[in-house]
Amino acid sequence: MPTTEEVYDQLRQVFDPEIPVNIVDLGLIYDVKVEDPKVLITMTLTSQSCPEARTIPDVMRRRCNSLEGIDETDIEIVFEPAWTPHLISDEGRKALGMDSEDSEDSDD
């Protein structure tokens, strides 16, 4: 049975065509569970009107189902908590040319 990290490795190969950063580094993946022979993923999108709302999950399913021992991938798309740029990883920030303070919330 694949590990959660192996699933994340597959998800790092999935990109939002409008943003040159994979969906993991964008912070769109909230949870991954591997329950033989199924993968359960909870994720969000950058917006509720994302034009790739159907394409991205289809690509995710194909990537995860390519892992030996996985027959099915269930994806739940949620909008709570809402995605914000502060969820982008350091690697994603570098790819986008963002400074770390670009997404820090101000308490002022």
Image (cartoon, grey):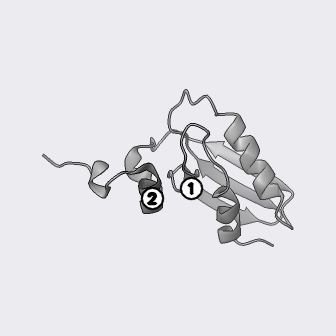
In the rendered image of this protein, does residue 108 appear above or below residue 2?
A: above
Q: Residue 93 at what x, y percent from top left?
A: 41, 55
Q: Which residue appears at 72% of the width and 49% of the height?
A: 60
Left or right: residue 83 versus residue 36 is left
Taking depth in this image into account, of 18 and 75 the one nearest to the observer is 18
Which residue is disc 1 drawn over? 24
Instruction: Count neighbours of disc 2 (C-alpha within 10 A) and say few if under 14, some if 14 to 19, many if 20 or more.
Output: some
Instruction: Report helix, strand or loop for mark 1.
Output: loop
**Contact, CB < 8 Å: mark 1 with mark 2?**
yes
Q: Quadrant of the N terminus?
A: bottom right
Which numbered marker is on residue 10?
none
The crowd level at tag 1 (other Cα within 10 Å; few <14, some 14-19, many 20+) is many
Counting the numbered discs, the total is 2
Whether 47 is drawn above or below 34: the answer is above
Q: Which residue is mark 2?
A: 89
Task: Report the amino acid beneath label 2.
Answer: Ser
Disc 1 marks which amino acid?
Val
Q: Could you tell me how far apart the alpha carbons at marks 1 and 2 are, in whole angstroms?
A: 8 Å
Residue extending farthest to the left is 108
Of marks 1 and 2, which one's residue comes earlier in the chain? 1
Local secondary structure at mark 2: loop
Residue 13 vs residue 42, the one in the foreground: 13
- Residue 30 position, x and y percent, is 54, 54
Give x and y (percent) for residue 16. Answer: 60, 42
Q: Residue at x 67, y 56 (%)?
A: 13
Query: Residue at image x 43%, y 52%?
Result: 87
- Residue lying at 83% horizontally and 62% vertically, measured from the top left: 70
